[in-house]
Structure formats: structure tokens, C-alpha cells
Image (tube, grey):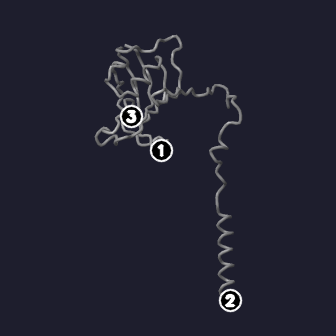
């Protein structure tokens, strides 16, 4: 009986000690949300988010030139991009970046030279605009993937900037 009581006391002491050693509680994601729709600080703009019928999501991080036109089908554009795997809604491994190479990527919009998510997302942008494109697998590389870099059925994230409409 004495060993039983000693064991219980030791267990309770360990539990109390463990509770005292924990660091400060981290706020839950809900606690991190603003409590109103007012800007948190002057100069911080709410990020614009657009969901397309195809499932593509575009989050504008920097608005482009308001007076500029959007690229038309067949027009060549110059873009900078960084591509990531979308791992359960979290930005995963970076797999490619024109920014890292220091060379913009040039292609014709809407003619199938790039994945469908790019054609659709970049056609909706204006010169100077920066956005994050959340691309479902069916608008990316689908079931085939892209070699060893992008696995089959991978959802993708691209940070893109429309530099020029050529």
C-alpha cells in the first residue's frame, strides 16, 4: 500500500512539474484574426481574393496599374514567378523560380503554352500586379505530374508578377 501511495504522489508531482515548465500558451489561429474589418495599420490593404469557376484562386498581393489593360489571348507577356507544391493548404517545397534565375519567363497567353491555371490567372492580371495563384491539380500537371519535380495530382502555388505585356 505504501508503494502504491508513493507511486501516485510521484505521478502527481511529475504532472504538476510538467505543467509549470511549459512555455507561454501560443494563441490559436482564431485569436490571431482581426476583430473588425478595419485595417490593422494605415497603409496595409486587405488582400483581394478571387475564386474562378474552374477552381483557380487568385490572391492579389500588390495591385497593378489600374489604367492598364489585361493581356488578350495570343499576346506575349513577361512574368516573374516562384512555384511551390501546395501541401494540404500550406506552401510546400519550392520547385522552380524565374526570380532565382534572374530571367523573366515570356509566353503567349491563352494558347496552351503553359498550364491552364497560368493561362487563366495571368489573363486576369494587369501590368505590375503581383498575385498568388492556388492551382488545383487539374489546372496544373494533373495525373501525369512533371517528372521528378512535381508529383502526379499535385496542387500548386505560384507567386507571379506580370512585368510586361509585349
CA gap, disc 2 and disc 3: 66 Å
Q: Where does label 3 land, which residue? A: 138
Query: First in sequence: mark 2 or mark 3?
Result: 2
Nearer to us in this view, 16 or 109: 109
Q: Is there a contact, CB below 8 Å, between mark 1 and mark 2?
A: no
Please report the residue visible at 47 percent of the width from the left and 12 percent of the height from the top. 69
Q: From the viewer's perspective, is 132 left or right of 74?
A: right
- Which quadrant holds residue 138? top left
- Residue 128 percent coordinates (x, y): 47, 19
- Residue 102 percent coordinates (x, y): 36, 28
Say which mark, if any, is on residue 88. Answer: 1
Nearer to us in this view, 59 or 81: 59
| Quadrant, the N terminus | bottom right
In the depicted structure, whether residue 31 falls above or below residue 106: below
CA gap, disc 1 and disc 3: 16 Å
Assign a secondary structure to mark 3: helix
Instruction: Give the foreground label among 2 and 3.
Output: 3
Assign a secondary structure to mark 2: loop
Q: Is there a contact, CB below 8 Å, between mark 2 and mark 3?
A: no
Q: Where does label 2 land, which residue? A: 1
In the depicted structure, whether residue 123 falls above or below residue 34: above
Number of labels in the image equals 3
Amino acid at each position: 500500500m505504501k508503494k502504491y501511495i508513493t507511486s501516485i504522489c510521484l505521478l502527481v508531482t511529475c504532472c504538476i512539474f510538467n505543467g509549470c515548465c511549459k512555455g507561454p500558451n501560443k494563441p490559436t489561429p482564431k485569436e490571431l484574426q482581426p476583430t473588425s474589418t478595419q485595417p490593422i495599420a494605415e497603409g496595409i490593404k486587405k488582400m483581394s481574393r478571387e475564386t474562378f469557376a474552374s477552381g483557380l484562386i487568385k490572391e492579389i498581393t500588390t495591385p497593378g496599374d489600374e489604367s492598364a489593360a489585361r493581356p488578350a489571348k495570343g499576346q506575349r507577356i513577361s512574368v516573374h514567378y516562384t512555384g511551390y507544391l501546395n501541401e494540404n493548404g500550406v506552401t510546400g517545397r519550392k520547385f522552380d523560380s524565374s526570380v532565382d534565375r534572374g530571367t523573366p519567363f515570356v509566353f503567349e497567353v491563352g494558347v496552351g503554352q503553359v498550364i491552364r491555371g497560368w493561362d487563366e490567372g495571368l489573363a486576369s492580371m494587369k501590368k505590375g500586379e503581383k498575385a498568388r495563384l492556388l492551382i488545383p491539380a487539374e489546372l496544373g500537371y494533373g495525373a501525369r505530374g512533371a517528372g521528378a519535380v512535381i508529383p502526379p495530382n499535385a496542387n500548386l502555388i505560384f507567386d507571379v508578377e506580370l512585368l510586361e505585356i509585349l
